[in-house]
Amino acid sequence: MGEKFVARRLRFGLPDEYLILNDVYLPLPDGTTTQIDHIVVSQYGVFVVETKCYKGWIFGNAESKVWTQSLYAGRRGWPKRAEKHTFQNPIRQNYKHICALADNLGIDKSYFHGVIAFVDGCEFKTEMPEGVVCSRRVAEYICGFKTPIIKPVQVPEVASAIEEWQGTLSEKQIDSHVANLHKRHSAVREGDAPRCPYCGGEMTLRKRRSDGKSFYGCRSYPKCRGIVNVE
């Protein structure tokens, strides 16, 4: 739903000469796949947009490996106790997308702009890093770039190259990519210790003091607060 909201913001907020590609799946040279929420191609650069949907307070900076989400207690529909969760720094995550696009299209990374769009529902308690915006302002932010760096005639050529690249990916590969994402974020059975979904480190079985339920927590806690619930 968040990606659809941002897609609408881009569609109705950008001029017609900005070419928009949504939900782009691309094969990589190592045999893996990557999914990019939105790509906007214009004479002002190629904007690679990552959508994030989080509630609560967000703490993070451009250099951190992980960011922290704090769900504060006491509001309707919120946990009885404040909860903290970590997630991968989306700027780093998006930079990997930029590198993949640059390498495979043969375009220097200086032609790309990373944008992280947070859908309404969260509040940054630290200063928002450059390129991180509220989803309501994503089109406005992109339109703020005024220096042409790509020839107008090359804009559709870049967009077509991305579409052709995506066309080499089979439906089976796309389904496998989605299935792996679900597996990564799904609950596991007790005894099947997973790898941390945020830092890739080892996890250990723990119990919540609030309700006594088991979960796997990252061994690097409190540096990394990654968790995986137990079925």
Image: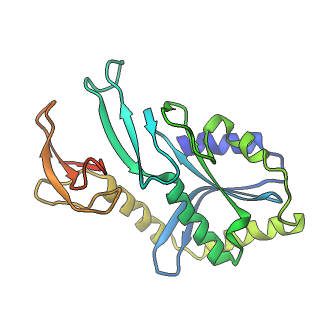
Name the foreground residue: 70 vs 228. 70
Name the colouring of the figure: rainbow
| Residue at x 86% of width, y 59% of height | 148
Q: In this image, 186 relative to 132: left or right? A: left
143 shown above or below 107: above
Q: Is residue 55 visible?
A: no
124 shown above or below 159: above
144 shown above or below 180: above
Q: In this image, 202 relative to 108: left or right? A: left
Q: Position of residue 79 (x, y in %)?
A: 29, 26
Name the foreground residue: 63 vs 215. 63
| Residue at x 78% of width, y 45% of height | 143
| Residue at x 34% of width, y 59% of height | 199
Q: Position of residue 90 (x, y in %)?
A: 50, 52
| Residue at x 31% of width, y 63% of height | 200
Quadrant of residue 46 within the rendered picture: bottom right
Q: Is residue 90 visible?
A: yes
Q: Position of residue 219 (x, y in %)?
A: 21, 55
Q: Position of residue 78 (x, y in %)?
A: 33, 25
Q: How many marks?
A: 0
